[in-house]
Amino acid sequence: MIKIYTFASNRPDFIPLQMRSFLKHSQESIEFTVFNNARFDCSEGADYHAIREACSAAGVGMIDIQKDPSLIARCQSIEVSCPLFNHRGIYSNANVAHAYALRWAWENVISKERCNVALFDSDVFLVETIKLSTLLEEYVMCNIPDGKPHPDGELMYMWPTFVLMNLATMPEPETLNWWCGRIKGVPVDVGGQTYHYFQAHPDLKIYNVPRKHFSDNPDVNFRPSNYDEFYLAGQTVLHYRSGSNWDHKAPEYHMQKLKWLRGRIG
C-alpha cells in the first residue's frame, strides 16, 4: 500500500485522470489525496471550487492548504527576495506557491506518516503496470536529483515532481524542508532546501530515478512535444509537463496533448 499526494490549483480535469491511472496501473492498493492550493493562487485557471468538485466526483481525498503565521515567518526568513503573499493575500509568484504548499502539507500531514508515500506533481501519471513501493524495500527514497553549480561542488537537492519515500525507515522526516530561497548564496528551485537534509544524512540509500525529456517527438501531433518519462522498476511513469499552461500554449495544443495523454493512460 502506498499513499500518493499531489497539489492542485488548476487543471481539475487532471484529478480523475490521475486517479484513473493509479487504479488501472498500480499493482498495490493506493490512497490518493489532493492538497487544494487554489485559495491563495491567482495564476491562470486557478479555481478552488472546481478542484473541490473534481475530487468529490472522483472519490479522491482533499485537504485545504492553510495559512500558518509561524510557517510563513520561517519561510520568509529564507526567501528574502520577495514576499510570500501580496497585499491581497495571494501568493506573490508560482515558486513560493508551490514551495509553501509543500512545506505546509509536509509539516502537517505527510511527515507524520510511517508508511510508503509518493509525491506526484498534478501532471504526472502512471501509464504502465507498476508497483511503486518495490524499490522502497531496498531504498529509503526514489528521487530525481536536481541541483545547481557551486564552486564548492554541485548543490544537490530533491525535485518534488516525483518522489517515493519509505517514512518508516527514513530518518527524521520532519526535518525535510521543501522551501526554495538560496543555498550558499545560490538561488535554488522548489525543494532546494532539501540540500540540508542530504548533508545531514549523507549515507541514505537513495535510488536516482532515470528520466528522459522529449522535446520534439515526431510521433506526436503537438509541438513542442515537451514531456518526460521516468523509468522505475522497468516501467514508465509519464510527466505531461506544463499542465498549468505557465508557458501560454494555445488551447488547441492542450486539446491534442490531452487526447494523447488519455491514450497513454489507456
Image (cartoon, rainbow, N blue to C red):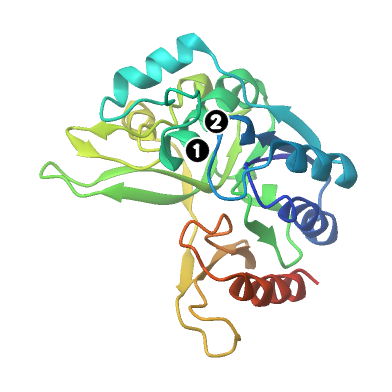
Instruction: Give the residue at the far left of this rendering.
Output: 151
- The residue under the point 68% across, 41% down is 47
Is 45 located above or below residue 91 in the figure? below
- Classify residue 259 as left or right of residue 213: right
Is 93 located above or below residue 250 in the figure? above
- The residue under the point 61% across, 18% down is 108
- Classify residue 152 as left or right of residue 127: left
Pick the residue in front: 54 or 212: 54
Task: Check disc 2 and report its element: helix, strand or loop.
Answer: helix
Q: Position of residue 249 (x, y in %)?
A: 52, 68
Q: Amino acid at mark 2?
A: Ala
Pick the residue in front: 63 or 202: 63
Q: Is residue 30 visible?
A: no
Q: Amino acid at mark 1?
A: His
- Classify residue 111 as left or right of residue 199: right
The residue tagged 1 is 98
Pick the residue in front: 264 or 9: 9
**Residue 101, numbered circle:** 2
Q: Position of residue 32 (x, y in %)?
A: 77, 41
CB atoms of marks 2 and 1 within 8 Å:
yes
Is 233 located above or below residue 74 in the figure? below
| Picture quadrant of residue 41 | top right
Quadrant where the N terminus lies?
top right
